[in-house]
């Protein structure tokens, strides 16, 4: 996916606060938690930035803690959708052995869990 089409999904209130590293990571420049995950207010609640991106990109429900969103770059403050993989906890375990697999096969009902 080209960065232009990614930017069609990820809203400006997120992309306005990034530093792009030479690895292509988008580092969150605003508040980060102790372990490095960026946080952002959205519609009255605080969410992790990479989860907000997963919501906008793939419709991963923000309130489904059983669906994790992981980093292929192992860089917690990164929120580049190209570096994120949504999946269930079970898939997480399996995925530790198949890092870097193809993404984009998840399709969530975007009306479910809409904040
Ligand atoms: Zn990254």
Image (cartoon, rainbow, N blue to C red):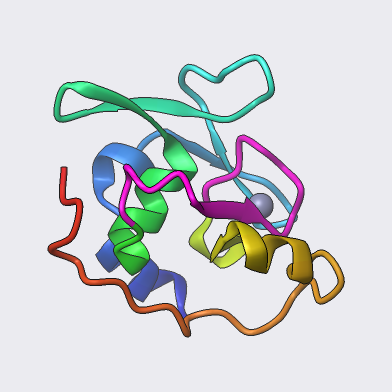
Residue 100 found in image quarter: bottom right
Residue 33 location, quadrant: top right
Is 112 on the left or on the right of 60, as rendered?
A: left
Q: In which quarter of the image is the C terminus?
A: top left
Judged left or right of residue 76, residue 37 is left
Give how far across and how far down residue 47 sits, in percent.
37, 31
In the orientation shown, which residue stands out farthest toward the right? 97
- Camera sees residue 85: yes
User: In the image, is residue 43 above or below residue 57?
Assistant: above
Q: Residue at x 32, y 42 (%)?
A: 63
Residue 60 image point, x, y percent: 35, 59
Relative to the observer, which residue lies in front, 97 or 26? 97
User: What's the residue at 43%, 78% (across, down)?
Assistant: 106
Examine the structure image and report whether residue 80 is included in the region drawn in magenta. no
Location of residue 23 in the rendering, given as x and y in whole percent from the top left corner: 74, 56
Q: Give the range drawn in magenta.
A: 61-79
Q: Quick check: is 62 in the magenta stretch?
A: yes
For this view, does 80 lie left or right of residue 63? right
């Amino acid at each position: 996916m080209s960065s232009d089409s990614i930017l069609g999904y990820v809203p400006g209130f997120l992309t306005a606060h990034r530093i792009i590293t030479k690895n292509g990571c988008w580092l969150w420049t605003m508040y980060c938690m102790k372990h490095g995950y960026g946080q952002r207010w959205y519609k009255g609640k605080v969410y992790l930035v990479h989860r907000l991106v997963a919501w906008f990109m793939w419709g991963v429900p923000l309130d489904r803690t059983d669906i994790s969103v992981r980093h292929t770059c192992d860089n917690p403050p990164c929120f580049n959708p190209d570096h994120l993989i949504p999946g269930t906890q079970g898939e997480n375990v399996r995925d530790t052995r198949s890092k870097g697999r193809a993404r984009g096969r998840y399709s969530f009902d975007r009306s479910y869990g809409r904040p």
